[in-house]
Image: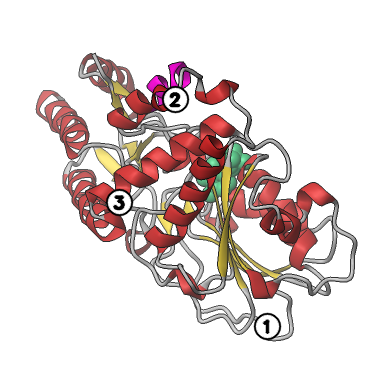
Amino acid sequence: MKKHNFSAGPCILPQEVLQKASQAVLDLDNSGLSLIEISHRSKAFVDIMENARALALELLGLEGKGYKALFLQGGASTQFLMVALNLLEKRAGYLNSGTWAAKAIKEAQIYDDIYEVASSKDANYNYIPKGYEIPEDYDYFHCTSNNTIFGTQMKEFPNSPIPMVCDMSSDIFSRSLDFSKFDIIYAGAQKNMGPAGTTLVIVKEDVLGKVSRKIPSMMDYKLHIDKGSMFNTPPVFAVYTSMLTLEWLKAQGGITAIEKENEKKARLMYSEIDLNPLFKGFAAKEDRSNMNATFTLENENLKETFDTMLKEAGVNGLNGHRSVGGYRASMYNALPLDSVKVVVEVMSELERKA
Ligand SMILES: *Cc1c(COP(=O)(O)O)cnc(C)c1O
């Protein structure tokens, strides 16, 4: 039986996407060949790559606005480095809102002195810093839209006077935003788009070409753009499966439609966390994430009982990250509302029992 999968990443994907992807591994579109045994230069795969790139821009509303979509490898973690290599000349400003943001800072620091415009580290990242100034003479400003580990999410973005780069790994395609405010957006596929193994990078072409350093080929956005995201062998399975998820999302009505579903799930989850006296939310209310809800038990003695009840209800992946403890309900696009209902039911059952 299919579990209620709250895993933070890799995470749940639509069942029909898993079915189609499995089928393509055996036989791609009745070609008599597997998706993973054909040349990436074949027309069949080139079409897949072009379709995936076009769908990403279409769903984000960025078609015809000077952006290119790339499917690269090395995870979002490689983007921490790549952003700096491609854009950092003098100095950059970073918003330190969580573990991933801090890792992005650490990588960029290899090349230059990074300025932290603001940080919420002293409060174990339980809120999003606000009211900071972005220096006008810096090369770019970097932020993280959703802090997967701590369960905080930026509800508003600054009007940055300099190019804005955003790590959207854990909430891309989950809510409507004016994506044209950003110059570079990147997201590891495995949170809301596909299997691990590829990273979507959206680049506004006119931010490139402004640094004086030589950029190694595999790290060079311009080169990947010129080669149509096919400079070397792309991760064909991850790109194909991501394309299927994007097609699924489009068929659901796109981002605006899925956003309504995501809001329903989050509202249900947070109302239980707020109303049930056995639980306490971790993140500051105004900043809490619609993707990852973090919460703890008021009484740790109930942990074993609660964990057993969750297991019996078929719930997977609700344990929190070690730096927060407690629980984390990751409610990505493909998670059904019914799965949230199951967890909420277990939480209220625990209250009745305790
Ligand atoms: C998971 C995650 C990452 C790291 O992604 P990898 O693909 O594993 O390198 C980076 N940023 C955020 C916000 C994440 O959630």
In the picture, the quarter occupied by the C terminus is top left
Provide residue 68's location: percent of width, then percent of height: 57, 62
Q: Residue at x 25, y 21 (%)?
A: 310
The residue beneath circle 2 is 28
Q: Which of pointers 3 and 2 indicates the residue nearer the eye?
A: 2
Mark 2 residue element? helix
Mark 3 residue element? helix
Where ligand 1 lies, by image quadrant? Answer: top right
The residue beneath circle 3 is 250
Residue 22 in the magenta stretch? The answer is yes
Left or right: 283, with 114 as reference point: left
Whole-angstrom CA distance, mark 3 to mark 2, is 21 Å
Q: Which amino acid does label 2 sit on?
A: Leu
Q: Residue at x 33, y 24 (%)?
A: 19
Which region of the structure is painted magenta? Answer: 21-28
Mark 2 vs ligand 1: CB under 8 Å? Answer: no
Q: Which residue is drawn at 89% across and 71% down?
A: 212
Q: What residue type is labelled 1?
A: Pro
For residue 135, which numbered disc appears in the image?
1
Provide residue 267's location: percent of width, then percent of height: 20, 52
Q: Is the magenta stretch mostly helix, strand or loop?
A: helix
